[in-house]
Amino acid sequence: MSDIKVTQELDCSGMNCPLPVLKTQQLAKKSKEGDILKVTSTDPGSKTDIQAWARRNKHEVIEFLNQDDKFIYFIKI
């Protein structure tokens, strides 16, 4: 697993579109610039949705992991 220093974690397992993106957006609004969010999702649609959301909002997905049925994103705010 990654050795990235995570500031906040969000587990969206079991949530379907659009909840993983909406919950990530809510957490990002409470975060400071430079924070690293770890977001876990089981929704296959999150693979494109969270990446697109990050680009639109000028955040960076610094790592993406696909482990079993989970998609894990490390997002720099």
Image: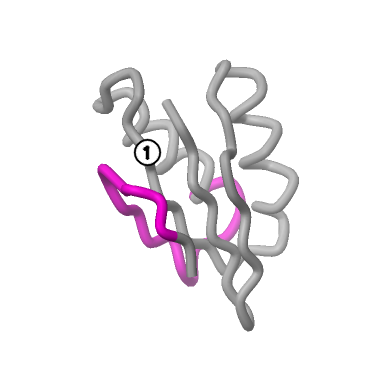
Residue at image point 65% right, 52% down = 46
Q: Main secondary structure of the magenta part?
A: loop
Using the rendered view, name the quadrant where residue 23 is placed: top left
Q: Which residue is mark 1?
A: 36
Q: Position of residue 10 (x, y in %)?
A: 35, 54
Q: Which residues are magenta?
A: 3-19
Residue at image point 70% right, 52% down = 47
Q: Position of residue 69 (x, y in %)?
A: 62, 79
Q: Secondary structure at mark 1?
A: strand
Which amino acid, by three-letter code, is at mark 1?
Ile
Q: Choose between 3 and 59: the one closer to the eye.
A: 3
> Counting other residues with Cα less than 10 Å from the Cα at mark 1, is it few (<14), some (14-19), or many (20 or more)?
many
Residue 57 within the segment the image draws in magenta: no
Using the rendered view, name the quadrant where residue 29 is placed: top left
Residue at image point 48% right, 70% down = 1
| Image position of 57 with respect to 8: above or below | above
Using the rendered view, name the quadrant where residue 65 is placed: bottom right
Q: Choose between 52 and 77: the one closer to the eye.
A: 77
Q: Choose between 18 and 51: the one closer to the eye.
A: 51
Residue 10 within the segment the image draws in magenta: yes
Residue at image point 42% right, 26% down = 77
* Residue at the farthest bottom position: 68
Q: How many marks?
A: 1
| Image position of 56 with respect to 65: above or below | above
Tell me which colouring the rendered structure shows. Answer: one colour
